[in-house]
Image (cartoon, grey):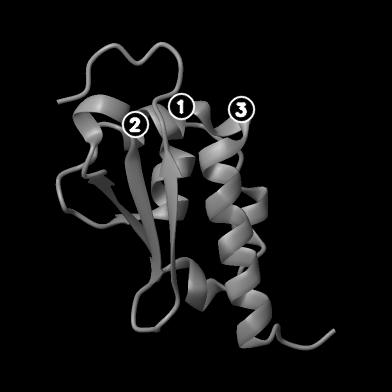
C-alpha cells in the first residue's frame, strides 16, 4: 500500500480530533485539556500518551505528521455561562486545522 494522500491524512487527523473530544477512553486527556487554556501549543501524541490514553489510532499517522500534529485550547466567548472550550487542532507548517467545541467532562470542578 502506498503513502497516504494529503486528504487521507487530514481526514485521519479530523477523526482523531473528534474522538479525543468525545470518546470516554480519552477522558483524562479532555480533563487535562480544560486546564490548558494558556495559549501554548501541545503535541497531540505526547500529551495523550503522557496521560495513559490509547495512542494506536494516532500512531497510524506517518511519522512526519506525528511531530507536527498539535493543539491549543481556547475558552469560548461565553465560557462563564457554558464552560465550553474550543480545541484547535493544527498540522504545523500546513494550512489544515479543525476546531472542536467541548463542554467540561464530569468531575471537573474547577476551571480558571
Mark 3 vs 2: CB contact within 8 A: no
Q: Residue at x 21, y 44 (%)?
A: 77
Q: Residues within 10 Å of mark 3 (few under 14, many from 20)?
A: few
For residue 14, what is the image quadrant?
A: bottom right
Percent of width and height locating residue 51 = 44, 32
Left or right of 99? Residue 9 is right
* Mark 1 → mark 3, Cα distance in angstroms: 9 Å
Q: Residue furthest right?
A: 1
Residue picked out by circle 2: 32
Residue picked out by circle 3: 24
Tell me which numbered mark, 3 or 2, is placed earlier along the sequence.
3
Percent of width and height locating residue 71 = 35, 56
Say what secondary structure mark 2 lies in. Answer: helix
Q: Residue at x 33, y 35 (%)?
A: 84
Say what secondary structure mark 3 lies in. Answer: helix
Q: Residue at x 39, y 25 (%)?
A: 104
* Mark 3 → mark 2, Cα distance in angstroms: 14 Å
Residue picked out by circle 1: 28
Position of residue 90 relative to residue 43, above or below, is: below
Q: Residue at x 85, y 84 (%)?
A: 1
Position of residue 18 relative to residue 30, above or below, is: below
Left or right of 70? Residue 40 is left
Amino acid at each position: 500500500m502506498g503513502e497516504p494522500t494529503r486528504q487521507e491524512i487530514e481526514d485521519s487527523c479530523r477523526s482523531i480530533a473528534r474522538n479525543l473530544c468525545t470518546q470516554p477512553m480519552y477522558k483524562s486527556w479532555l480533563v487535562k485539556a480544560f486546564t490548558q487554556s494558556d495559549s501554548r501549543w501541545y503535541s497531540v501524541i505526547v500529551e495523550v500518551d503522557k496521560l495513559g490514553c490509547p495512542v494506536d489510532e494516532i500512531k497510524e499517522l506517518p511519522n512526519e505528521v506525528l511531530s507536527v500534529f498539535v493543539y491549543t485550547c481556547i475558552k469560548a466567548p461565553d465560557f462563564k455561562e457554558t464552560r465550553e472550550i474550543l480545541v484547535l487542532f493544527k498540522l504545523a507548517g500546513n494550512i489544515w486545522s479543525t476546531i472542536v467545541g467541548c463542554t467540561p467532562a464530569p468531575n471537573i470542578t474547577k476551571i480558571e
